[in-house]
Image (cartoon, grey):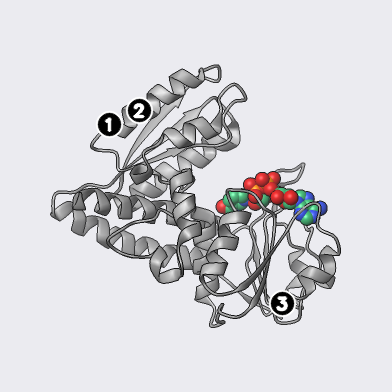
Amino acid sequence: MAHIIDGKKIAGSIKELLKQEVQSLKSQGLSPGLATLLVGNNPASQIYVKNKHRACQEVGIASFDYHLPEMASLEQVLAAVEELNRNEKVHAILVQLPLPSQVDSHRVLESILPQKDADGFHPYNLGRLLSAKDKKELTQKDSVIPLPCTPHGIMALLESTDQSISGKQAVVIGRSVIVGKPVAALLLAANATVTVAHSQTKNLEECCAQADILVAAIGKSKFVTASMVKPGAVVIDVGINRDGEGKIWGDVDFESVKEKAGWITPVPGGVGPMTIVMLLKNTVELARGYRRK
Ligand code: NAD
C-alpha cells in the first residue's frame, strides 16, 4: 500500500512560511500584490480566480481583481495588461486561461512584463527554465525565474518524499505548456532521465511501467491503471476531471494504483493545493525582485 502524499498539508506549511515572509516584507514597506485578469464568465475560471484571491488574503498578499466581458477584443485585453504592467502596487499578473477564442492567448501572455509573470508562462521565463543548467540555477535568489505553478508544486511534492530524483527514470504523460513540458524540464534539471509521453506515444503502458516517477497530466479520468505502474513508483496525479455529478476524479485509478505504487497523490488534496501556493510563492519572490531593482 502506497504512502499518500498529502498536498493539502504540505501546501499549508508553505503557506505559513509565506505568511511570515509577507509580514516581514510589509514591515520593510513592501506589500506584495497579485492582479488577476479574467475575461468572460467561464464558471470554472471564476471559481479558480476566487480561490486565488482567498489564498492571497490568507497570507496577507494584496490582490487586485480585473474582469473584462466575454466579448472583449485582443486590444482591450492588451490594454488591461499594459495598465497592470505599469501599476506599482502589482508585482505579479495572472491572466486566467482559457481566454475567449477571439483573444490570442500567446499575444496576451507575451505582453506581461517577464518580471511580473505570476504563472511563469512568458516565453522569456520558459526559455530561462529550459536554459538553466541545474536546479541551483533555477532557484538563484538574486535572479528570480517564476516557475509554472503546477509543475513547481509537483516538484515540491516529489521532494517531500524521501526518494531522490537524481538518476531516476521519470515519465510524464502529457505535453502541455502548463504542465507536461515544464515539469519535464524541472525533472531534467533535477537530474532525472525524462520521457514525455503523449497522445501519439506507442507502447504507452510499457513506457510508463519503467517509470520510478510517473506524472499523469492527461485530463482523462482514471486513465493510469495499475498495469502501467512499476511497483514502488512515485505517482503524481495532476488530473482534475469532473463527472456528471460534479465529483472530481484524477487521471490515475487511485484505488488500484495505490496498491502497487510506493507513493501517490490523491485527487483532490494532492497537486491542486500546491498550484495555488506556488502562485503565492511566485508573487512574493517577484515582489522581492522588484525591491532589488
Ligand atoms: P491538455 O489537454 O493541454 O494536455 C493533455 C495532454 O495529454 C496532451 O499533451 C495529450 O497529448 C495527452 N494525452 C491525451 N490523450 C492521451 C492518451 N490517450 N495517451 C497519452 N497522452 C494523452 O491538459 P493540461 O492542461 O496539461 O491538463 C491535464 C490535466 O491536468 C487536466 O485534467 C487538467 O484539469 C489538470 N490540471 C490540474 C492542475 C492542478 O492544479 N491540479 C493544473 C493544471 C491542469
Q: Are marks 2 and 1 in contact (CB under 8 Å)?
A: yes
Q: Distance between the residues labelled 3 and 1?
A: 48 Å
For the point 60% across and 62% down, which residue is it? 184
The spot of residue 116 in percent (x, y) is 35, 43
Camera-nearest residue between 267 and 135: 135
- Which quadrant of the figure has residue 211? bottom right
**Disc sitting over residue 261 in the figure:** 3
- Which quadrant of the figure has residue 99? top right
> Badge 3: how crowded within 10 Å, few (<14), some, or many (20+)?
many
The spot of residue 12 in percent (x, y) is 43, 63
Q: Give the label, 2 or 3, closer to the camera.
A: 2
> Badge 2: how crowded within 10 Å, few (<14), some, or many (20+)?
some
The spot of residue 246 in percent (x, y) is 70, 43
Camera-nearest residue between 179 and 110: 110
N-term mark: 3 or 1: 1
**Disc sitting over residue 86 in the figure:** 1
Q: Do the residues labelled 2 and 3 touch (CB within 8 Å)?
A: no
- Identify which amino acid the numbered label 1 is placed on: Arg
Q: Do the residues labelled 3 and 1 touch (CB within 8 Å)?
A: no
